[in-house]
Image (cartoon, rainbow, N blue to C red):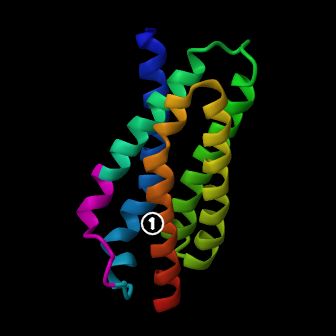
Amino acid sequence: MDYVKLIVAVLICLLAGAVGSIFTAKSVSTWYAGLNKPSFNPPSWVFGPVWTFLYILMGVSLYLVWSKGLGTGGVKAAMVIFGVQLLLNILWSLLFFGLQNPLLALIEIVLLWVMILVNILYFYKISPLSAYLLVPYILWVSFAAVLNFFLFRLN
């Protein structure tokens, strides 16, 4: 096991979360707190631990693919797709919390969901375990998309 690659992969994902949280932190206690929310909206304290756990899983997933070697068939393409979905993950926070635009965020989260699915399919060909580690992520983003839709609709 290459512990340096593992740590780098996890840190890349946690860094993406940290960048996204820059946009989130400014709006959670102000703009977001004032939104009408659906009955199934989790308490705000849930999001930090859930996302941290998901970013760690994403990092381990990335490591499992990266550890196969960049020369291995499909690894480079899979890592590029991973990078695209990670950027889309950050972009959602910018659109929803930074720009305070639930409609644009809703459109973008659908694209994010599709890219996560594509990511899972590419990772599965290289390392099935890496794909399975992304399942909680796509499930949470599915929930987030539904929540985003209701926040848009209610406000």
Task: Locate residue 140, reporting x and y percent.
Answer: 44, 58
Task: Locate residue 34, reporting x and y percent.
Answer: 34, 85
Q: Which residue is mark 1?
A: 143
Q: Is residue 121 visible?
A: yes
Which residue corresponds to the image point at 70% horizontal and 34% vertical from the top-left? 80
- Helix, strand or loop at label 1? It is helix
Task: Decide: is 68 above or below 23.
Answer: above
Which residue corresponds to the image point at 42% horizontal and 62% vertical from the top-left? 24
Q: Nearer the viewer, residue 84 or 141?
A: 141
Q: Specify the amino acid type for callout 1.
A: Phe
Q: Which residues are magenta?
A: 39-49
Q: Nearer the viewer, residue 71 or 130?
A: 130
Crowding at label 1, few (<14), some or many (≥20) Cα neighbours within 10 Å? few
Residue 4 colored in magenta in the image? no
Which residue corresponds to the image point at 69% horizontal and 32% vertical from the top-left? 78
Q: Nearer the viewer, residue 57 or 51?
A: 57
**Image quarter of the N terminus:** top left
- Is 95 situated left or right of 37 in this image? right
Task: Locate residue 12, reporting x and y percent.
Answer: 49, 32
Task: Locate residue 48, reporting x and y percent.
Answer: 31, 53
Q: Is residue 155 visible?
A: no
Task: Decide: is 26 above or below 8.
Answer: below
Residue 48 colored in magenta in the image? yes
Which residue corresponds to the image point at 60% horizontal and 41% vertical from the top-left? 120
Q: Residue furthest top?
A: 1
